[in-house]
Image: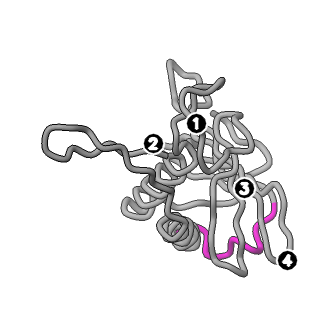
Amino acid sequence: YFKCETNGDFMLTVRTRPCLYNMMQVYEGNYRYLLRLLPDMKEICGTVFSEFNGRPVLFIDVLEQCKYTSMLAVTHYLSFENDVVADMELRLRVYHDARVAEVTSYQHHKKLLPVYSYPNKKMYQTFEKKQVNLFLEEWLEFCVRYGVQFEKIPREVYF
């Protein structure tokens, strides 16, 4: 992890590290936003969804529900010419005892490392995991701000 700074007429390279404290704030924020969207998150079994213009667009699947943790899949769909297309999928690990939520995979990219060297085989950004979690934070904040509400999915949902 390097940062370049100018010092007069020459460039100075300084070694930096990602700050765990800053990331914990993001994880805590993600948990708070999730609780505002899903106050009964610990009791949810199965799938909940949100609609836009009468069509389901945002699904949250509870993949695993344990005493202290939950695993969620958050999927967003786009409508395109009377069809829907899966636009994005995130998998979240929610730690209820620690009150944090973090992205564990996105778009089928699994086991995100906190830091990658660059360039790398998969061309991840240096702080890929941080960027994905910041994206989740912005997305959840948007949902809270604009009053997105979730309801249990009926047996058949028609797109």
Dots 4, 1 in contact, CB < 8 A: no
Q: Which residues are magenta?
A: 36-45
Which label sits on residue 53? 2
Work out how far the residue at label 4 is from the one at label 1, CA to CA, in angstroms. 36 Å
Of discs 3 and 2, which sits in the foreground?
A: 3
Q: Residues within 10 Å of mark 4 (few under 14, many from 20)?
A: few
Of all residues, the one furthest to the left in this rendering is 8
**What residue is shown with label 3?**
72
Residue 137 image offset from top left, x and y in percent: 48, 58
Q: Residues within 10 Å of mark 3 (few under 14, many from 20)?
A: many
**What residue is shown with label 1?**
117
* Amino acid residing under circle 2: Asn
Which label sits on residue 67? 4
Residue 147 image offset from top left, x and y in percent: 42, 63
* Amino acid residing under circle 4: Lys
* Amino acid residing under circle 1: Ser
- Identify the element where label 4 is drawn: loop
- Sequence-first tag of 3 and 1: 3
- Identify the element where label 1 is drawn: loop
> Quarter-wise, where is residue 119 in the image?
top right
At x 37%, y 59%, the residue is 146
Work out how far the residue at label 3 is from the one at label 2, CA to CA, in angstroms. 25 Å
At x 62%, y 51%, the residue is 114
